[in-house]
Image (cartoon, rainbow, N blue to C red):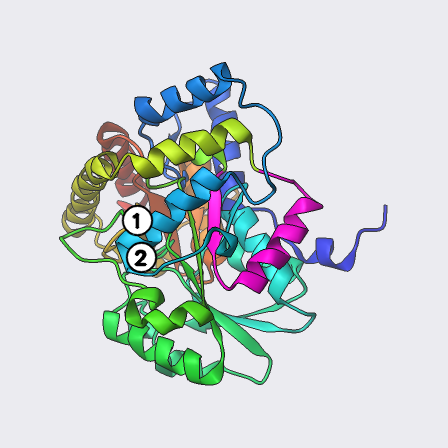
């Protein structure tokens, strides 16, 4: 069958592909250690699960308004007011089927063919693909020479007459790096003058280490509400990835357009899942703070292990999220895979790790930097220790 041009442009998610291959090997009885997962390994809190059960028992199984139940949108508005000091009406908020769906609706609503969105690189694998699927053009801005921090200089360097906006993901996937507050303020001021949109993806806002603070464009200047589109979800903060509840807050006309698109694609997100999200948002951050502390312990262990035991691989120190982005360029040209071929790319190295050492990692090329791999520490410390020992063995002869 002849496929559409847009469908032909899109690559499958590398993270999901790695996770699927690792699961297949496990099903065959192989002792695979997976660093691929992009979701917390903690169970969803009982108070959230009980809220879903209660909703089901009360018959909350029918359609809701396309953009979500009013109670949930009100809770989201209260979250924005409490956390950022910005007030939203329910008409400026839409609830969608996860963060990816939120972004797809957003770019479908705002982009015409050829419009450009600046994407700091390394980037989450789905940004570029969703932009392309929406007819837009992702323009990647390399941050590797600036300690993986995006700034106004990089924005200006990649700006064209077709630029509609810029994505800010801080702390980011895959590096975990937190942007400097002054850089976000400078970008916000510039965006307001140029009438550019800032798409702030705040999915990891509650997983930040070392006492550092989250900051976004809405906090830089309250008038930035007009030029900021905030995308978030309950997925990471409350370990609710399978619930598929994301949300977007932005200018009313844009949200209305997203609502129209959603009405003709998915309609409302799962009704009972919305009640789970409502309970999550009303339940505070005790659970997410517990996860953050555990993630920091794992991060610290991994950083110390690499520093003491694997000199040929150098991780970026993450300020948040639950990933270690590791420079593997020193191993290129020095290892051979099972076919006897020299390893010279992140994909080849990840294949080598999985085939020979049963360790699943995600190649950095999928995030825009082929010199790196991504290791998720959203898994138990015992698993992390075993996996790191295998990685050490894989490069011990160098």
Vertical arrangement, residue 14 with respect to residue 19, above or below: below
The quadrant of the picture occupied by the N terminus is top right
Pointer 1 local density, CA inside 10 Å: few below 14, some 14–19, many at least 20:
many
Please tell me whether residue 256 belongs to the stretch shown in magenta. yes
Name the residue located 60 percent from the left edge and 80 percent from the top edge. 162
Residue beneath disc 2: 171
Name the residue located 41 percent from the left edge and 57 percent from the top edge. 88
Q: In this rendered view, identify the residue nearer to me: 38 or 242.
A: 242
Residue beneath disc 1: 321
Vertical arrangement, residue 155 with respect to residue 15, above or below: below
Q: Which residues make up the magenta segment?
A: 245-268
Q: Give coordinates of residue 293: x percent, y percent.
A: 17, 40
Vertical arrangement, residue 54 with respect to residue 4, above or below: above
Q: Give coordinates of residue 240: x percent, y percent.
A: 40, 33
Mark 2 or mark 1, which has the lower sequence index?
Answer: 2
Q: Badges 2 and 1: C-beta atoms under 8 Å apart?
A: yes
Name the residue located 58 percent from the left edge and 73 percent from the top edge. 116
Question: Does residue 351 show up?
Answer: no
């Amino acid at each position: 069958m002849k496929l559409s041009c847009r469908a032909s442009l899109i690559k499958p998610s590398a993270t999901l592909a790695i996770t699927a291959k690792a699961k297949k090997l496990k099903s065959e009885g192989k002792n695979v250690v997976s660093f691929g997962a992009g979701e917390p390994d903690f169970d969803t809190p009982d108070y959230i699960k009980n809220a879903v059960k209660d909703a089901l028992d009360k018959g909350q199984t029918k359609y809701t308004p396309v953009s979500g139940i009013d109670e949930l949108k009100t809770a989201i508005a209260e979250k924005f007011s409490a956390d950022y000091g910005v007030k939203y009406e329910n008409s400026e908020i839409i609830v969608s089927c996860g963060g990816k769906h939120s972004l797809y609706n957003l770019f479908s609503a705002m982009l015409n063919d050829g419009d450009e969105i600046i994407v700091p690189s390394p980037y989450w694998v789905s940004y570029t693909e969703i932009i392309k699927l929406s007819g837009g053009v992702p323009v990647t801005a390399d941050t590797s020479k600036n300690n993986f921090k995006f700034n106004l200089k990089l924005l200006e360097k990649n700006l064209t007459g077709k630029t509609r906006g810029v994505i800010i993901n801080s702390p980011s996937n895959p590096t975990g790096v937190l942007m400097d507050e002054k850089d976000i303020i400078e970008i916000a001021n510039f965006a307001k003058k140029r009438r550019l949109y800032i798409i702030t993806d705040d999915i990891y806002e509650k997983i930040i280490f070392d006492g550092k603070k989250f900051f976004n464009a809405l906090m830089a200047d309250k008038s930035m509400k007009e030029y900021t589109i905030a995308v978030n979800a309950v997925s990471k903060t409350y370990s609710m990835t399978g619930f598929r509840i994301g949300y977007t807050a932005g200018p009313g006309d844009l949200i209305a357009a997203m609502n129209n698109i959603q009405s003709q694609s998915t309609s409302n997100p799962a009704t009972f899942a919305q009640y789970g999200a409502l309970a999550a948002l009303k339940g505070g951050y005790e659970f997410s703070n517990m996860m953050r502390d555990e993630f920091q312990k794992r991060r610290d262990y991994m950083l110390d292990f690499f520093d003491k035991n694997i000199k040929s691989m150098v991780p970026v120190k993450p300020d948040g999220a639950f990933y270690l982005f590791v420079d593997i360029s020193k191993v290129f040209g020095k290892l051979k895979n099972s076919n006897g071929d020299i390893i010279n790319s992140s994909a080849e190295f990840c294949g080598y790790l999985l085939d020979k050492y049963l360790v699943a990692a995600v190649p950095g090329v999928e995030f825009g930097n082929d010199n790196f791999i991504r290791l998720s520490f959203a898994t138990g410390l015992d698993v992390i220790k075993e996996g790191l020992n295998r990685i050490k063995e894989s490069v011990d002869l160098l």
